[in-house]
Image (cartoon, helix red, strand yellow):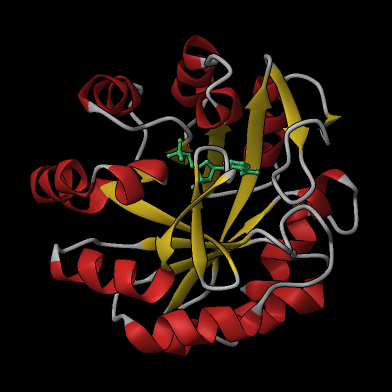
Amino acid sequence: MTKLELLPAVDVRDGQAVRLVHGESGTETSYGSPLEAALAWQRAGAEWLHLVDLDAAFGTGDNRELIAEVTKAMDIKVELSGGIRDDASLAAALATGCTRVNLGTAALETPEWVAKVIAEHGDKIAVGLDVRGTTLRGRGWTRDGGDLYETLARLDSEGCARYVVTDIAKDGTLQGPNLDLLRNVCARTDRPVVASGGVSSLDDLRAIAGLVPQGVEGAIVGKALYAKAFTLEEALAAVS
Ligand SMILES: O=C(O)c1ccccc1N[C@@H]1O[C@H](COP(=O)(O)O)[C@@H](O)[C@H]1O
């Protein structure tokens, strides 16, 4: 059986690796140097890094140079997120050598542009479906952006290669993933899904791995690793 990919997360705010609760600005816990965190996940055996520019996502500036430095230092695949909303920010993101980018707000606010870049860049583009219930949220998860399943159908029809599905209510809470949401999304698309939000234990990862046959390809792990609920080595062994 295909194994679940694990994507340890490094979210960057004001030059520091941080974790948020429910993605809310002001709830940051700081974990120091983003480069050191990323190198630690790479040394532990990660095949992917999920790297987020939170300032760009919130519209409070950006960490573009640092994000490029971290991406270039990696020998592993990198998924870049946060503030990629137009030609300039997409070009800067792709120029880092990342494996793919993850678009959030743009998919809600500038759908024509997103359709264009999906057509141009294929599987280098993923779309982040960040939801409260079944309502999408953009602009640092502060604004409603439409219905999850209507947007999913539109993006599918435009050829979107992959979705990163985040339950905002679970994100950063260590309360376990929303397996029903993942099942429901997988039932409505044949594209691979990366699960995000709530992972708290190796059993959570095993539960997500149980959805690989339905279309879940990977899981982003953040707070649980930083809080040392388990090690990345243990997580990789649990899903291999
Ligand atoms: O990852 C987070 O904790 C997070 C919190 C608040 C906003 C965004 C967050 N993360 C990533 O940013 C993209 C969205 O960025 P944008 O809307 O394209 O600028 C989202 O998909 C998450 O991957």
Instruction: Please state the horizontal and vertical placement of residue 56, each as a whole percent of the image.
Output: 51, 24
**Quarter occupied by the C terminus:** bottom right
Q: Is residue 94 left or right of residue 22?
A: left
Q: Which quadrant does ligand 1 occupy?
A: top right
Quarter occupied by residue 207: bottom right
Q: Residue at x 52, y 73 (%)?
A: 134
- Determine the residue positioned at 79% across, 47% down: 21
Residue occupying the point 67% across, 61% down: 197
Residue 127 versus residue 237: which sits nearer the camera?
Answer: 127
Q: Nearer the viewer, residue 52 or 6?
A: 52
For the point 50% across and 38% down, which residue is it?
Answer: 139
Q: Is residue 11 visible?
A: yes
Above or below, 235 relative to 106: below
Number of numbered discs present? 0
Figure check: 68 above or below 97: above
Quarter-of-image position of residue 192: bottom left
Task: Indicate whether 174 appears above or below 216.
Answer: above
Residue 69's x, y, as percent? 50, 14
List x then y, in percent, for residue 113: 17, 41
Which residue extends farthest top?
65
Q: Horizontally, is 129 left or right of 150 in the view? A: right
**Is 151 on the left-hand or right-hand side of 186?**
left
Q: Measured from the top left, where is residue 109 in percent x and y?
A: 31, 44
Residue 100 seen anywhere in this rendered image of the structure:
no
| In this rendering, position of residue 102 left or right of residue 115 | right
Say which of 39 and 220 sits in front. Answer: 220
Q: Who is closer to the viewer here, 149 or 195? A: 149
